[in-house]
Amino acid sequence: MKLTNVTRVQIFLVLMFTLCASEGKKRPSSVKDEDECSHDNGGCVHMCMNTPGNYSCVCRDGFMIASDGKDCLDKNECFENKGGCSHQCINTLGSFECKCSSGYMLDPTGKSCIIGQWCHASLGCNHACRTSLTSNRVECYCRTGYILHSDGKTCLRSCEVGNGGCQHICNTTTEGPVCSCSDNYILNQDKKTCTASCSVNNGGCERKCVDSSQGPVCSCPVGYKLHQDGRSCIDVDECEKKIDGCSHLCENVKGSFECVCPPGYKVSTDYKTCVDIDECLLNSTCDHKCVNLPGSFQCHCNTGYQLFGITHCADVNECAVRNGGCIHTCSNTEGSYTCSCNTGFKLHPNKHDCIDAGQCISLVQQPNSLLTCVHVEAQEQQCTVTCGKKAQLIHENGLLNTTTMSFKCGPSTNYEWTNMENGRLPQCSESISAPSYSRKAKLGFIRDSCDVDPKDIEIMKQNLTETFNNEKRYKCKNRCQINFLDFICGSRNKKFWKLVHHSKRSLIIAEFELQMNSNHHSGKCDVDCTAKRNLQRFNRAFKKFKRAVKRQKYIVRFENKDLKPIKKSFRPDKNIKELCKDGMQLLNSSCIGCTFGTFYNKDTQKCHPCPRGTYQDMEGQLSCKECPNRLPGSGVEGATMQKQCSELCDQGTFSASGLKPCMPCQVGTFQPDYGRISCISCGSGLRTRDAGSTGFKDCTFRILCDAGHYYNISAHTCSKCGKGFYQTQPGQDFCFSCPGKTTTDSDSSVSSDDCKDRRCGQHMGDYFGVLESPNYPGNYPVNVDCVWKIRPEKRRRILIIIPKIELGDEEDCGDRIIMRKSKSLQSQSTFETC
């Protein structure tokens, strides 16, 4: 399968079973015709005629077959040659009658007219009269197919003529024909014609049919209305009539409507209101941080990373721009960078400048401590840090078990301070405590059923909490808590399964975690002493609980029934975890609150220095306070007070220490950073208009370079940003490097959005996988061919789902996606679009 410049494609490998069985040839057997007319007359209202393999309905004389092929309708014989009548033809149901003009009467054939009306006028005969052969009297008689009424004058049609005027069934009586209807038909008020009920072809209705005395009545379901023909249903456009109630868009569908939401929204449970989709609920939405917005979302990257492809983060190569601000060597690292100095120099506390290695860096006094420094020998200094009464010295590895520590710097130490770690003085902390302890355990029960009510979990959780805290033997003293409890129903634990596998009862394993919180240490028992005592009590509590279970002295009441655990079923984990409260980090089995100038990071569970532009003047905090000026990069790292927010030299200034008081950068130089000890030259022949310039833009270069270009200070010309670089602003002397392994499609790029990942995305599992175009979900780069090969195991097939494709709009179909049955370019193409 070859996909060229496409958007995301999801592939699910679905296990499909194909059952194939070869069938031998069978001899054709003789087929016996089924007589459809034998069952309910084949549905015919008159006569049914069976034919080989089929049947047809036939109507009596005077009728013709209806469009449904079963009902019979009256045939108007008068249409053809007046039905053979010499004067007038009157159509009747199933037949017709001839009438004569005034002064004439019908002859015995019933069609021709003869002169004279004396039979009608004198005798009142309905048809004709004649002399009786027996009585020699003149009497009335009727034409063939009619019978004379008992009044001797009126002629009644029999069922033999035109089916007696009945549309369906005719029954001859002394009073004349009596009509009835076939099954599923209704006799109309004229007592002759029949109307199909709802049982026959749904009464002719398209949707709903209800029988009434007037025949079937058609109606339509909600979302439709009845057509003028009284039978068909036509769709009601709720959107056009504004009766939809949709909060945003309405889309009409057959018989209903759907409320449609704009991108980033979904229809709520009322099917009308659009609510925001919180894309950030999915951890995979953004590589780093996700911020939900109404109808959308934004991804943000951690410090040292840059966003690309809408959702991805890649490392920024800070060294690519002015050497990362490093005076000597810049080394890029994942998410950061470091500066280093040449031989004979060492790094300044601002971590960018290099100073003479033959000088000691001044130490800064920390809160809760006293710093005293003296010169002990020529060029030798010795400083002592002393903690306050309630504070102890701590370092990165934990307590130092002392309140005083000395440091020395000079020629004998290569001008490096002794006893320092990572260039930082140890701090004095008053927030020190012993850790809490937690441990998981399992407990077995036998119950009548495997049904577990959530209430049972809460009952046992509360029961365990009260047991450990209230019974003196456990010595918890209200410091024990159950962090979680869960039931595993139907467990097949080998040891206990034999107790239930021959019965209908169920084995339930209760898994829980017990935590014993630390108490405060005292003068007689320090932190280490308190930690040891707490751990002993914690282990002793588990041993005593195990003994109580074994002796069946621990009881839980479920469903008004006391339940004892299985003997010897208590199984504690081997691992015991040490825990600290938020704002404190675990160092060498001690909980130490994050000191001044630091904050506690829940992700790393460590204390980190406050970044520049922030400070923290309290211990054990989860974040740092913003400096009043809120300038990023201003202030020292790890600031312990608000005053330190403005100690660094501002942009456009410098000093020998990088701290205030500072001097403005001289004309022809600039400084975009804080706390620097020198300024950057504009370059040969370039000057600034004034002192104190903060960027290259203040330099008086000969030409203003456009975005996507940079000013070459050696050639004094504008050069294009090469591939993999971009510049968003005009008048700059550098180009930004694309993050990570991204690059641009061409040179002269003016936006970070031009940085794209050219690697074809692929995430394959055992049963499903995801294929992504390069840089998905951002725009894909140009001139990239992605070829993915998927080879399923035997008896497996591949189901490919493409939820959305957005290809470049080109007339020559330059971007396309092609799926082939094999890796050969000549193999059959199963899907192709562009």
Image: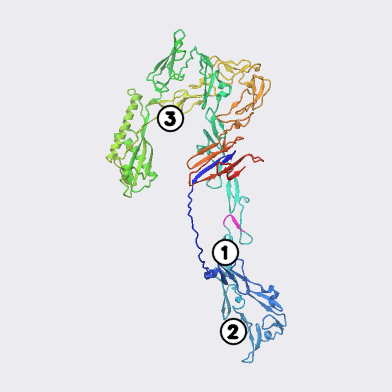
Q: Is residue 729 magenta?
A: no
Residue type beneath disc 2: Ser
Tell me the residue at 62%/66% (across/down): 67
The residue nearer to you, when weighing 354 against 619, is 354
- Tell me the CA gap for discs 3 and 2: 115 Å
Q: Is residue 112 above or below residue 760?
A: below
Percent x, y for residue 745? 62, 32
Q: Which residue is mark 2?
A: 150
- Tell me the CA gap for discs 1 and 3: 76 Å
Q: Is residue 328 above or below residue 115?
A: above
Q: Quadrant of the N terminus?
A: top right
Q: Is residue 542 above or below residue 608?
A: below
Mark 1 element type: helix
> Which is nearer the N-term, disc 1 or disc 3?
1
Q: Which residue is mark 1?
A: 201
Mark 3 element type: loop
- Tell me the CA gap for discs 2 and 1: 43 Å
The residue nearer to you, when weighing 110 against 533, is 110
> Which is nearer the N-term, disc 3 or disc 2?
2
Image mark for residue 582: 3
